Amino acid sequence: MTFWPAHVTEPRPYRQVKRGGSKLDRTLTEIQVSLPPKIGEQPYSASPKLVSALETAVADLREVDSGSAESLNTMASFLVRTESIASSKIESIEASTEDFARAIAGSKANQSATLMAAGAKAISNLIDEVGVAGSFNKVVILAAHGILLAEDEVESRFAGKFREVQNWIGGSNYSPHLADYIPPPPELVDEYMDDLIVFLNRDDIPVVAQAAIGHAQFESIHPFTDGNGRIGRAIINAVFRRRGVSRRVVTPVASALLANQAAYFKTLVDYRAGAIDGLILNLALAAQISGREALVSALNIETMPSAWVHMAKPRAGSAAERIINLLVMHPVLSAEQAEKLLGASPQSIYEAMDALERAGVVHELTNRQRNKVWGATAVLAELESLNLRIAQAVGRLSRSLG
């Protein structure tokens, strides 16, 4: 078993901010906060039983990233949307694929779908910024959080800011009484994040282990009032990008974590006690499964344009044919977007989309006469299929491990 320092607890005075709850909530005056270890320079060496899993995970991640530029460009937006959906569902943010598609297109959608779409933007922003800079910093993490919560009806005023209040996980909504976990007090968040940045920018740790530990440490710090889980899981792929394991795509590891939430949450709890092997192994297996299933989706998506041509039989050079060439990169397409991308008139776009809808290539998502939005039926179905295949693979693995 790999040594890792455990969290310690420390008593701190407490005064209720949000009035209400039970008498115990209202009269609570002292809490036991958890203080994670500082890990910026903490030595790490993978235990022998983890080495093979870590190496296999890296090989699978590189394989997803090894396609042609065209296929990778196609997969990049698809996979980041898959990751956002799964990461949001872990936080009990639920929306249908079609609601999510409407939100991506900027069309009217429910709040959950809007948050999922914002999650996709936040994930992409964090990973791309870290990739370009070659390093993590607090500014890019705060910026991603700002994007994530910008349209949140409740939390938008806290977007892009580290918390200034004490938060907690579980228990009452009114106080940390009976909480499952109480993170460090707000005055320590900044220095803990500085230390985490040092750890995330190291190059002497196996990449998947670094991603797993960095994610768990972030969740222990819990630096935001909301959005900690979604930003924390985005850090995983940002580590992969910084270390050059995945240079252009996002592997949907959150889909695998979602498939066995109990095991995932247990590894985060165990991390606080200094047990990290399970945490690292869980992420390594999640990376293996999600990487392999992403490759299946890549192959499926590559065949779609020729299938669409066969289904719709568009005239050469027609708007319908040109739209087919757009659909893999833009599986959710509004009339306005299509007009701009093709330089075509509204009439020709609507006529082409009508023809493609009759052929079963696309279907309308908005059910209105103007400013319509369509989805590429096969691509949206593949989005759901990928999550299902990952869940099934995780289930098989869980059963085999007993």
Image: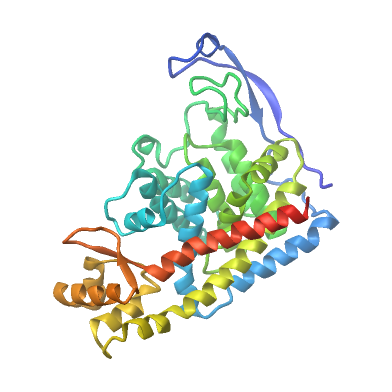
Among the 4 quarters of the image, the one containing residue 305? bottom left
Who's the residue at 36% across and 82% down the image?
Answer: 311
Task: Say above or below: 345 vs 259.
Answer: below
Count of numbered labels shown in the rendering:
0
Judge from the rendering whether residue 8 lies leftward or rightward of residue 182; answer left or right: right
Among the 4 quarters of the image, the one containing residue 362? bottom left
Q: Where is residue 215 shown, x and y percent of the image?
A: 61, 47
Q: Where is residue 114 shown, x and y percent of the image?
A: 36, 49
For the residue pair 271 and 128, the one nearer the viewer reads as: 271
Task: Say above or below: 274 vs 285.
Answer: above
Judge from the rendering whether residue 2 lies leftward or rightward of residue 36; answer left or right: right
Among the 4 quarters of the image, the one containing residue 343? bottom left
Q: Where is residue 235 shown, x and y percent of the image?
A: 56, 52
- Report the coloring of the rendering: rainbow
Task: Say above or below: 395 vs 158.
Answer: below
Residue 100 appears in the picture as rendered = yes
Task: Say above or below: 119 vs 290.
Answer: above
Who's the residue at 52% across and 26% down the image?
Answer: 166
For the residue pair 30 and 388, the one nearer the viewer reads as: 388
Who's the residue at 34% across and 76% down the image?
Answer: 326
Q: Where is residue 332 shown, x and y percent of the image?
A: 34, 65
Who's the residue at 60% across and 51% down the image?
Answer: 259
Residue 244 appears in the picture as rendered = no
Judge from the rendering whether residue 198 lies leftward or rightward of residue 372; answer left or right: right
